Amino acid sequence: SSQEQKEFGDSEAPQKAPIGRLFNLNKPEAPILLLAVIAAFVHGLLFPLFSIMMSGGIRTFYYPAHQLRKDSRFWALLCLLLAIISLIAIQLEFFLFGMAGGKLVERVRALSFQSIMHQEVAWFDDPSNSSGALGARLFIDALNIRRLVGDNLAILVQCTITLISGFAIAFASDWKLTLIVICVIPFLGLQNYIQVKFLKGFSEDAKVMYEDAGQVVAEAVGSIRTVASFCAEKRVITMYSKKCQATMKQGIRSGMVGGLGFSFSNLMLYLTYALCFYVGAQFVHDGKSTFKDVFRVRYTHLTCEVILFNDLTNRPGCLQVYFALVFTAFGISQTSAMASDSTKAQESTTSILAVIDRRSKINSTNDEGIKLEKVDGNIDFNHVSFKYPSRPDVQVFSDFTLGIPSGKTTALVGESGSGKSTVIALLERFYDPDSGTISLDGTELKNLTLSWLRDQMGLVSQEPVLFNDTIRANIAYGKRGEATEEEIITVAKAANAHEFISSLPQGYDTNVGERGTQLSGGQKQRVAIARAILKDPRVLLLDEATSALDAESERIVQDALDKIMVSRTTIVVAHRLSTIKGADTIAVIKDGSVAEKGKHESLMGIKGGVYASLVELHSKASAS
């Protein structure tokens, strides 16, 4: 709905995108398209030229034997010439249009992915922008656009030339008969229009269904270990099958509509033939045709060779009109096959250009803003209110105020869902507060250059995200420029990771696998810490960095964290309260605001306090 689009921050709702936008994107391939159009022009002329050849060739059968042999060679050679031209023109036409379409798809996918990468996090919270849906959209939409600019554009240009040249030949031969036969064309146009309208709805629904099915595949493959551990393969397969059944039913309905449209276009094609025969016969009967004797002989089954010969050789107009219109109608009928693809392409163009054109509310590509010369690391939350765009009915923060001093460690504790991780999300500007301000060294975050701001912060989360690449490459992601081998080894040592990395057969060149599955939890976390250290951040954000580790791994990782926390402003989201007893400040979050704040000892001294209750509850849970 429009309200949902507003909540998720769509800067502009998808509009009907003109196909002309695609050709603007295809401008670099203009020379290729020009050659392709020339080839299509030649291809489009072949049918009408063949009509002239056919009408002329038939006449030769009524010539004397010596002239028949001579003229038959001429028409045979002409037919061979058309075949050779056809071979070259059609090959060039589809090759060049295909090349232009392929380059357009490459460009569209690159622009779409670039736009996706710069959207604010809130945009991805919308289920329609999930990883599976976006992956399917990039593939399906780009493929539909490729069909439009490739094969369909070739057919469109070819049929347009066939239409113009065919009618030109027909009008030149017998304009009266041509005008009568033309009355069929509006019905063919109406059929195509209705077919496109019907297919449009089917195309929109099918697109959503394919994206849903793609999402199931992405989630199942991405969580294959969880699926396997719960023996949930059949359940996932059933879920995917249901999604596919919906697309199958939609495909059947779409096929029925497409089949009706295509069969109707063929009906009109044969009606054109019939009309041409019938009207031609009437003209013959009424004496209005320049080819009267031929049609009189044809329809009365009279075989007067002399009359037939005289009329065929001297007045070929009616036969030429017939063949010109027959081949023109055949060419026009081909365009109905484009209805389904053109409808899909229109929807895909609208969808993918909406992604390309969308401007993120929190734009990381914008270099405007302030870059502080010196960062101390003082952070202030002032009367912040916030709700997640995906959950507008849940108030996370209400008048949230918290000061985080420079160079100190501040721990955030509270019940699950209290908003501890939201503090980090707001600091990284994954989201902006609904009201209130957040500042770094007295400057509001919104006024700082976003990319510079994020460079000042190093984030280590509970579930570290590693890319399917080498350990060296994953650590190097922490630095914008090229990281030297010395820098990578130095930060790995600081993160207590160098020893285990060196023990691996391929060392720093070891591939971590998809999402780091080739490493243990503790190893992944230490690589993530090394990556964060490489940024040399002034502010360190630890979002339950050790909560998912066993005791030994936690000890090693905590030692690494303790070393890098020195002299940095550090914000720790704590799950295990035992890890934050030494924090300079502990802030207890409850009901969207800071309920208590102080050191561990002072908070434990508050009788019936929130922190003391949490520690007691945690102690009981650990004991049991």
Image (tube, rainbow, N blue to C red):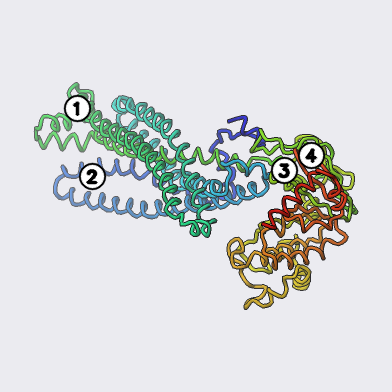
Q: Nearer the viewer, mark 3 or mark 1?
A: 3
Q: Are marks 3 and 4 in contact (CB under 8 Å)?
A: no
28 shown above or below 10: below
Which labelled disc corresponds to residue 192?
none
Mark 4, residue position: 593
Q: Name the kind of residue labelled 4 in the image.
A: Ser
Q: Specify which label sits upstream in the sequence, 3 or 4.
A: 3
Mark 1, residue position: 281
Residue furthest top in the image: 286
Q: Are marks 2 and 4 in contact (CB under 8 Å)?
A: no
Query: Could you tell me if residue 366 is visible in this image?
Result: no
Other residues around mark 4 within 10 Å, as few (<14) / some (14–19) / many (≥20): many
Given residues 226 and 67, the one toward you in this image is: 226
Label 2 – label 1 distance at C-alpha: 21 Å
Q: Specify which label sits upstream in the sequence, 2 or 3.
A: 2
Q: Nearer the viewer, mark 2 or mark 4?
A: 4
Label 3 – label 1 distance at C-alpha: 88 Å
Label 2 – label 4 distance at C-alpha: 92 Å
Other residues around mark 3 within 10 Å, as few (<14) / some (14–19) / many (≥20): some
Give the image quarter of residue 392.
Answer: top right
SS class, disc 2: helix
Q: Specify which label sits upstream in the sequence, 2 or 1.
A: 2
- Name the residue rendered at 72%, 70% in the picture: 497
Mark 2, residue position: 57
388 shown above or below 405: above
Given residues 455 and 529, the one toward you in this image is: 529
Q: Specify which label sits upstream in the sequence, 3 or 1.
A: 1
